[in-house]
Image (cartoon, helix red, strand yellow):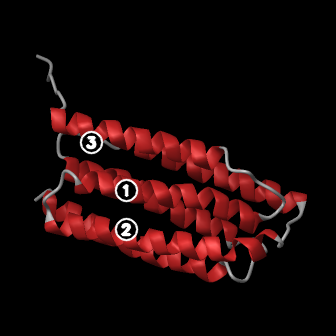
Amino acid sequence: MTNQFRFSDCTKDYLTQFYYILDEMIHGMDCAQLNDSISHNFIVQMIPHHQAAIRMCENVLQYTQDPALRKIAENIISMQTCSIRNMESVMGQCSCVTNSCQDLKLYARRFHEVTHTMFHEMDTACTDNNINTNFIYEMIPHHEGAIRMCENALRFCICPGLAPILESIISSQTRGIQEMRQLLSCMQQ
């Protein structure tokens, strides 16, 4: 006997929007206008990544009543909106910090590895009709990807104004992952 699992209409609505946002994020990151500055390239690819997280949180807030998950989503919106503003404020000075062809290639190779894994894990994260847990399963790889992208950029010569922003992203998203894993554990008990 086969288990005929079907998504509810509510889950379908949530997922339709989630996958639309995910596809836009992938397109925005893949089609960003890159140059010979790792700092610039990081910013123009991280901004669509953050914008997607904000929109994914706005999406889940339409469906969840869980106070802890609502708080997590609202915190992500606040933190990533601030991070976008910070990156935009240093964009001009950071675009002037150029890197060697070798560094650009090494940076881009690791960036591609990180984003390929992240895109796949987010695309296959949905498991059932529980939108709350689906969101967590989707957002954890999103945060992990941001952390790895920051760690990758920090291996190279980058704009001095960008380094503290990357450290802040690593710190806030590490904390966010811990909060989501704790909430997921509570939800599954």
Along the line of sight, the residue nearer the viewer: 146 or 94: 94
| Residue carrying label 1 | 139
The crowd level at tag 3 (other Cα within 10 Å; few <14, some 14-19, many 20+) is: many
Q: Which of pointers 3 and 1 indicates the residue nearer the eye?
A: 3
The residue shown at (14%, 59%) is 187
Disc 1 is placed on an element classified as helix
What amino acid type should be assigned to the residue bearing mark 3?
A: Tyr
Q: Which badge, 2 or 3, is on the more N-terminal residue?
A: 3
Mark 2 vs mark 3, CA separation in Å: 18 Å
Along the line of sight, the residue nearer the viewer: 150 or 73: 73
Q: Is residue 155 above or below residue 25?
A: below
The crowd level at tag 2 (other Cα within 10 Å; few <14, some 14-19, many 20+) is: many
| Quadrant position of residue 7 | top left
Disc 2 is placed on an element classified as helix
* Left or right position of 83 against 95: left
| Residue carrying label 3 | 14
Mark 2 vs mark 1, CA separation in Å: 10 Å
Q: Determine which of the numbered discs, if any, sits on residue 26 in the image.
A: none
Residue 155 image point, x, y percent: 71, 71
Report if residue 124 is visible in the image.
Answer: no
| Residue carrying label 2 | 76
Disc 3 is placed on an element classified as helix
> Do the residues under discs 2 and 1 have CB atoms within 8 angstroms?
yes
